[in-house]
Image (tube, rainbow, N blue to C red):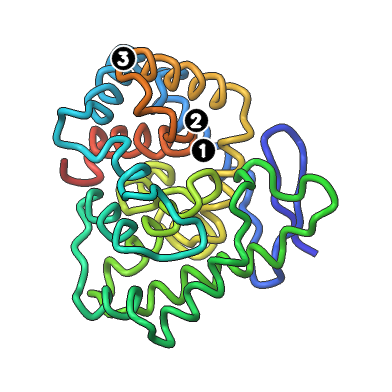
Amino acid sequence: MSQGIYADGRTYELPSTWAPAELPVLEFATAQTLVALGAGTGNPDKVGRQLGKYFDPDGKYAGALFNTIGPSQNAANDITPADLLAVTTLSMSLDPRQIRQLLEPTSKRELVLRSLQQIDTDLSIQELGSGEVDPRPMLNAVSDFYREVRSTPKPSSTRWVFASKLAARKRPNLLPVRDNVVCKFLAGDRNLNRTSIGSHDIDLQVFGYLMSHPRVRDALDHWWSELRAEHGSILDDVTPLRILDVALWNAGIAAGYGES
């Protein structure tokens, strides 16, 4: 039986189809993350400026809008027009056929919602296996959600990114925003592949490890407080995991892994 590991020594059970993330992958990603958060060899002043710019409500980036957009905010177990609009704020274009499949009463929408409804709405990524609940059925539902969303019409190179961004919108404490910039930064010079970073089963273990690391959590708490002081209550619906996403993306752009 395979297990995922947290930075604080806890473990949790993995589905039989998931490969366990190797410790060198987790440790390298942690070192990269501490740099991105200005807690390692990074520049904290630069990190603060970048995060402040990203979450500035008068700026050009999505900021808190990704989490808050919509008349009823985020309907946890439904896919709504507001969810798809939120995804577009992260530089994601949608195919009209894709929109119809996810919003109209189609068999695809039914499958997506069925998997979404099996994913805990309150659980955080650093709490898998907490208590007496077996996380494996829910993690299988996460895999199902990614697979069903990836199979909606879209150029193949960006299907997985769309699935990741929609998942992060629906479960902001549990599922991170993953794209090539973030994954390449966390992997460094390693190729993205099934046993390293770049596959959702490995990536979620990596983010769980990061979010359970004391130095990472301290840095995220610090930046949330700083951003809250700078931009006010718009940060109330922004999770620490979302701040981590943004810090990693900023660092990945600075390292030359994508275009700003």
Which of 79 and 242 lies nearest the eye of the viewer?
79
The amino acid beneath tag 2 is: Ala
In the image, residue 117 lies at what x, y percent?
Answer: 58, 66
Within-10-Å neighbours for mark 2: few <14, some 14–19, many 20+: some
Q: Could you tell whether 103 is left or right of 214 in the image?
A: left
Within-10-Å neighbours for mark 1: few <14, some 14–19, many 20+: some
In the image, residue 166 lies at what x, y percent?
Answer: 38, 59
Instruction: Tell which circle, 2 or 3, labels the residue nearer the N-terminal end.
Output: 2
Check disc 1 and report its element: helix, strand or loop. Answer: helix
Which of 70 and 48 lies nearest the eye of the viewer?
70
Residue contact at pointers 1 and 3, CB within 8 angstroms: no
In the image, residue 140 lies at what x, y percent?
Answer: 63, 69
> Which residue is identified by label 1?
28
Residue contact at pointers 2 and 1, CB within 8 angstroms: yes
Check disc 3 and report its element: helix, strand or loop. Answer: helix
Check disc 2 and report its element: helix, strand or loop. Answer: helix
State the residue at coordinates (40%, 19%): 38
Q: Could you tell whether 79 is left or right of 8 in the image?
A: left
| Image quadrant in which you'd find residue 48 | top left
Q: Could you tell whether 255 is left or right of 168 in the image?
A: left
> Which residue is identified by label 3?
230
| Above or below, comparing residue 55 to residue 177 in the picture | above
- Quadrant assignment for the N terminus: bottom right
Whole-Å distance between the Cαs marked 2 and 3?
27 Å
State the residue at coordinates (22%, 29%): 57
Instruction: Tell which circle, 1 or 3, labels the residue nearer the N-terminal end.
Output: 1
Q: Which mark is residue 31?
A: 2
Residue lying furthest right: 132
State the residue at coordinates (65%, 72%): 17
